[in-house]
Amino acid sequence: MTRLLSIAALLIALSSFQVWGAGPKMLDAGEDIDFNEAWYKKDRSDEENFKRLVTGLEKVSTGKKVIQKATEKAAQQGHTLFDIVAIGDGSLTDTTLIRRFSASNPSQVMYETRSKVYLNKHLKTLDALLDFAHELTHFTYREPFNPYDARFHLKDFIKSTVEGRGGEVDAYMVECKVLKELLPGEGFSRSNCQKVWDQKTASVSKEMGVMEFYKVGHHFDGLKKDLEKFAINEKELPQASNNEALFISSAWGLPYPVAAVKEYVNIMDRVCKNDQNRISLMQNKLGRAPADANNQDTKDFRSMSEDYKSRCEKFVSQ
């Protein structure tokens, strides 16, 4: 069994909110919740801490929908909402792809994906509510991907990460909708959400969000070179621009499209090393059998080797 850990590590990248004038608003949650107090307290159990956030989010319509959909998704996997959340030193949605095969038959492979939402224990309650809504959006809607699949390409990974269903733009829009409902006045108007707020429609705009998240500043020339390396025409990512980047991945400290390239290469490095091990197991199996070009194991080995060469020539030494 080989494990590709944290293949969605890029999703941990959250855009920091700058909310001024957000007074100590109180929510009725059995007991009052103060936006400015720490959401995590050691004298409460982890579940109790999360339940207070759930209650807080359920007080507004967008937050209620987020909790409902995440709960349904967890139930589909045989879990409760509290089974898929945990306390952390940062807010992130961590996805683990598990690949299973036996040493005696490495050509037969099974895959399983597991996700866990971690929430930064050092946040104030308002920030925790926003981060929680953001990460649950990733958990609920983010489309799973398989980096062992030959169709796993950089362009698609960038688009999925930034503008895809449950990606960074979607998660940020949910954050902003929750903030607007919690603090409809000055707190919202002085936040970074103004960058994705369409005054004409009085709502968050995905189009504006996509434009913002593709701003890479002085990394633009480097991004173009990376795209060329993977035979991607820059016109295939027309929104990418050299305008100043406001939204930065905390996973890499880089604008999202640039961080996506780094994450893709990191993922593929590990995938190809894992595939090297799998091919070695297949070689060992063939070494114990008479050479036969028509043998199914021989055919499988050739297919695996050709697939490996086509996918991994840019990532590990051949």
Image (cartoon, rainbow, N blue to C red):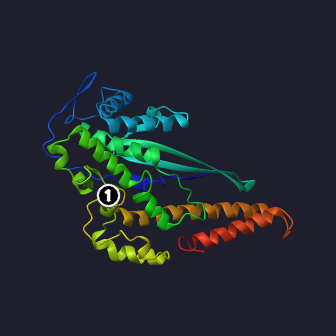
Q: Position of residue 256 (x, y in %)?
A: 36, 62
Q: Which residue is found at the position 85% from the left and 68% from the top?
A: 294
Q: Which residue is found at the position 74% from the left and 69% from the top?
A: 302
Q: Which residue is found at the position 20% from the left and 46% from the top?
A: 188
Q: Which residue is found at the position 44% from the left and 63% from the top?
A: 158
The quadrant in which residue 212 appears is: bottom left
- Left/right of residue 5 with respect to residue 214 in the rendered view: right
Q: Which residue is mark 1?
A: 209
- Left/right of residue 278 with respect to residue 115 in the rendered view: right
Outermost front residue: 200
Q: Say which of 180 and 216 sits in front.
A: 180
- For disc 1, the neighbor class at 10 Å (few under 14, some 14 to 19, many from 20) is many
- Left/right of residue 272 with respect to residue 120 in the rendered view: right
Q: Is residue 122 visible?
A: no
Against 44, is 104 above or below? below
* Screen quadrant of the C terminus: bottom right
Q: Residue type at mark 1: give it.
A: Gly
The quadrant in which residue 76 appears is: top right
Q: Say which of 308 and 18 sits in front.
A: 18
Against 78, is 161 above or below? below
